[in-house]
Image (tube, rainbow, N blue to C red):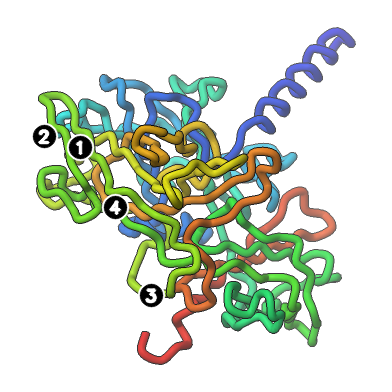
């Protein structure tokens, strides 16, 4: 290879690497793509975890609102535990072909909204991950990875440790009534780790969320092959509150949260009853989806390609009907991917004295909430639900290991702790 050819090859590699680093997990890059879902087979509310070389299956779903038939493909990208692309060839972590076409699709039926629903069962017999770790599932058009459509996180685990723990109340007076503290341990007896304190990393998730993830947590004690984590100022999350709900499983039979609806021959609009600030109200337990949503219908057989869409307007009534000075209100929950952007930001309507935001949602059961964000300091956020230690939450503990010769982190354990698991009556 001539020096000129070497230079061109280097530039091409840098451009590819730069493009891959610009991609972020759990993102949609095309406006015509809606309701992207990746979850274990038959369980819409679970984290997409695949046991390496096991019999697990995952479901991928998404709708193309432009209709018609297109050639969608998917592939896997191995990432480190911070979700940055790993410097590893795809031949080292993909078994079989490097990309797979999504051949299972259905045109919408019964619904007023016309779309094409695509779905795939992962892993395919022709393509599967060959090592554990964090993966970014990438969907793209016509076999061209540059025409990216959407991305989703995928966790591939090869269990080599045992995780156990519980949820406790913090001792700090300012956190005692509002936060939840995790006390847990990791037994790595099946792992030949030279320096566990350096090689083992912990990532904590609350209700499968990645927006408030905690990582880089060091062990408090190491007893033999057991790493114990019990530090007062780490592994502590705001408790939050049970989420507000929206029932769209039927667009004909309006639920209690709908104030009115407009029906036309081609579309449906739903207007919700105004919500208010729940901060400071007394805590009341009721079963919720922990901020997530489920695609469901009452009146059809298959909600994925028979479910309809509706434009839903959310309303939030501020105290005394006055806009918050220097602050914005955002919708939050899985329905907006917990992101703070133009889609989730609410606009104040001075005539109605409420904040409004409209979302185009598929039929299902939704959880949602509101967050107050300072305009000058977006990092300063205040949930308008309140925080309570009693709140029902589910925590996931991800255990990563990286030997001194590895180029990517291995996912060696996944543990779950439910706050109500050790309370009588639940």
Dot 2 lies on which element? loop
Q: Is residue 279 left or right of residue 198?
A: left
Residue assigned mark 3 = 284
Helix, strand or loop under label 3: loop
Residue at 57% x, 82% y is 166
**Residue linked to disc 4:** 246
CA separation in Å, label 1 and label 3: 33 Å
Circles 2 and 3, Cβ within 8 Å, touching? The answer is no
First reached walking from the N terminus: tag 1 or tag 4: 4
N-terminal-most mark, 3 or 4: 4
Near mark 1 (Cα within 10 A), the count class, few <14, some 14-19 or many ≥20, is many
Residue position for label 2: 110
Image coordinates of residue 40 in percent, x first then y, are 39, 56
| Residue at disc 1, secondary structure | loop
Instruction: Let me know if residue 49 appears in the view.
Output: no
* Circles 2 and 1: CB atoms closer than 8 Å: yes
Residue 202 pos. (x, y %) = 69, 65
Residue positioned 69% across, 84% down in the render: 171
Name the one closer to the observer, 194 or 383.
383
Label 3 Cα crowd, 10 Å radius (few <14 / some 14-19 / many 20+): few
Q: Position of residue 380 (x, y in %)?
A: 66, 50
Quadrant assignment for the N terminus: top right
């Amino acid at each position: 290879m001539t020096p000129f050819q070497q230079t061109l090859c280097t530039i091409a590699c840098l451009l590819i690497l730069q493009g891959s680093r610009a991609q972020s997990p759990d993102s949609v890059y095309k406006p015509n793509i809606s309701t992207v879902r990746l979850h274990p087979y038959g369980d819409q509310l679970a984290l997409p975890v695949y046991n390496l070389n096991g019999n697990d299956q995952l479901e991928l779903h998404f709708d193309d609102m432009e209709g018609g038939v297109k050639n969608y493909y998917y592939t896997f990208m191995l990432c480190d535990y911070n979700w940055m692309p790993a410097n590893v060839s795809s031949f080292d972590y993909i078994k079989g072909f490097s990309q797979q076409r999504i051949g299972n699709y259905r045109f919408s039926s019964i619904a007023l909204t016309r779309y094409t629903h695509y779905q795939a069962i992962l892993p395919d017999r022709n393509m599967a991950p060959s090592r554990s770790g964090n993966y970014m599932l990438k969907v793209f058009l016509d076999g061209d990875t540059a025409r990216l459509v959407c991305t989703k996180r995928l966790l591939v685990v090869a269990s080599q440790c045992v995780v156990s723990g519980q949820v406790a109340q913090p001792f700090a007076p300012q956190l005692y009534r509002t936060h939840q503290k995790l006390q847990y341990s990791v037994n790595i007896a099946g792992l030949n780790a030279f320096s566990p304190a350096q090689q083992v990393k912990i990532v904590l998730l609350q209700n499968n969320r990645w927006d408030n993830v905690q990582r880089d947590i060091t062990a408090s004690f190491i007893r033999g092959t057991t790493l114990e984590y019990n530090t007062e100022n780490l592994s502590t999350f705001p408790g939050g509150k049970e989420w507000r709900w929206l029932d769209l499983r039927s667009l004909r039979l309006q639920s209690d949260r709908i104030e009115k609806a407009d029906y036309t021959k081609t579309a449906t609009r739903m207007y919700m009853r105004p919500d208010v600030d729940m901060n400071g109200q007394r805590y009341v337990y009721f079963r919720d989806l922990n901020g997530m949503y489920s695609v469901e219908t009452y009146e059809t057989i298959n909600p994925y390609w028979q479910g309809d869409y509706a434009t839903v307007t959310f309303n939030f009534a501020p105290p005394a009907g006055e806009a918050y000075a220097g602050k914005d209100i955002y919708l939050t929950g899985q329905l907006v991917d917990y992101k703070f952007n133009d889609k989730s930001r609410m606009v104040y309507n001075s005539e109605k004295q409420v904040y409004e935001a409209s979302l185009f949602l598929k039929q299902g059961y939704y959880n949602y909430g509101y967050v107050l964000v300072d305009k000058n300091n977006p990092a300063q956020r205040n949930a308008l639900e309140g925080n309570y230690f009693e709140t029902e939450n589910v925590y996931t503990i991800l255990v990563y290991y990286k030997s001194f010769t590895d180029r990517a982190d291995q996912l060696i354990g996944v543990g779950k702790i439910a706050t109500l698991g050790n309370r009588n009556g639940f």
